[in-house]
Image: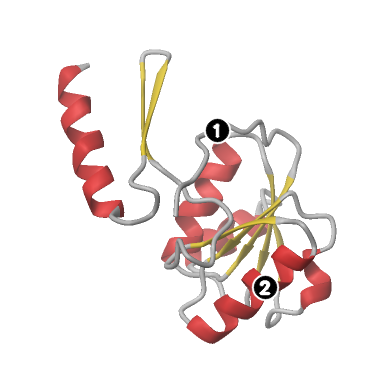
Amino acid sequence: MRFYPVNLNIKGKLCIVIGGGKVAERKVKNILFYGGKVKVISPELTPMLAEMSGQKKINYIKCKYQSRLLKGAYLVFVATSGRKINSKIAGDAVKSDIMVNVCDSAKKSTFVLPAVLRQKGVTIAVSTDGLSPRKAVRIRDKLKELI
């Protein structure tokens, strides 16, 4: 599968993260960095996500996934540990014409995230079309040495 490279302006856009663990935490930090609004749907949160919720940096919905909760989303990030529920969420997002990233499955995703290097006003994104995220990170780290 090949993905079309693009940089998105998500400022003020609703980005939904489903899951409340460490992977979700990384997604939330990046969405906030780029100015997106974050809604997290999960029965539980990491301490850091709980703190963000308490500070009103994110909107937290404490529950298991329900398809109606995708309403209004610009992007959906699926970061649960259950492959079956991840697949259902991805299917629901696609049916609703919402772009979706399933953190452990490029095949079920409509977009994948590159390894990103930001330095001195330059952003470099390295993608392997979801085939080898670790390889993309290694390449990004080598590029960091050059800048």
Rendered image quadrant of residue 125:
top left
Q: In this orientation, which residue lies closer to the viewer: 104 or 43?
A: 104
Tell me whether the residue at label 2 lies in contact with that at label 1, contact meaning CB atoms closer than 8 angstroms: no
Q: In this orientation, which residue lies closer to the viewer: 123 or 135?
A: 135
The quadrant of the picture occupied by the N terminus is bottom left
Vertical order, 95 against 11 (above or below) = below
Q: Amino acid at mark 2?
A: Gly
Vertical order, 110 against 9 (above or below) = below
15 left or right of 3 in image:
right
Q: Amino acid at mark 1?
A: Val
Residue 70: percent from the left, percent from the top?
Answer: 77, 65
Q: In this orientation, which residue lies closer to the viewer: 132 or 56?
A: 132
Rendered image quadrant of residue 94:
bottom right
Q: In this orientation, which residue lies closer to the viewer: 31 or 113?
A: 113
Q: Which residue is mark 2?
A: 91
Q: Residue at x 76, y 79 (%)?
A: 66
Q: Residues within 10 Å of mark 2 (few under 14, many from 20)?
A: some
Vertical order, 59 against 85 (above or below) = above
Residue 138: percent from the left, percent from the top?
Answer: 19, 43
The quadrant of the picture occupied by the C terminus is top left
Mark earlier in primary sequence (2, 1): 1
Badge number at residue 6: 1
Q: Residue at x 45, y 53 (%)?
A: 26
Vertical order, 121 against 46 (above or below) = above
Residue 103: percent from the left, percent from the top?
Answer: 46, 63
Residue 69: percent from the left, percent from the top?
Answer: 80, 69
Q: Secondary structure at mark 2?
A: helix
Q: Residue at x 47, y 69 (%)?
A: 21
Q: Residue at x 66, y 31 (%)?
A: 9
Badge number at residue 111: none
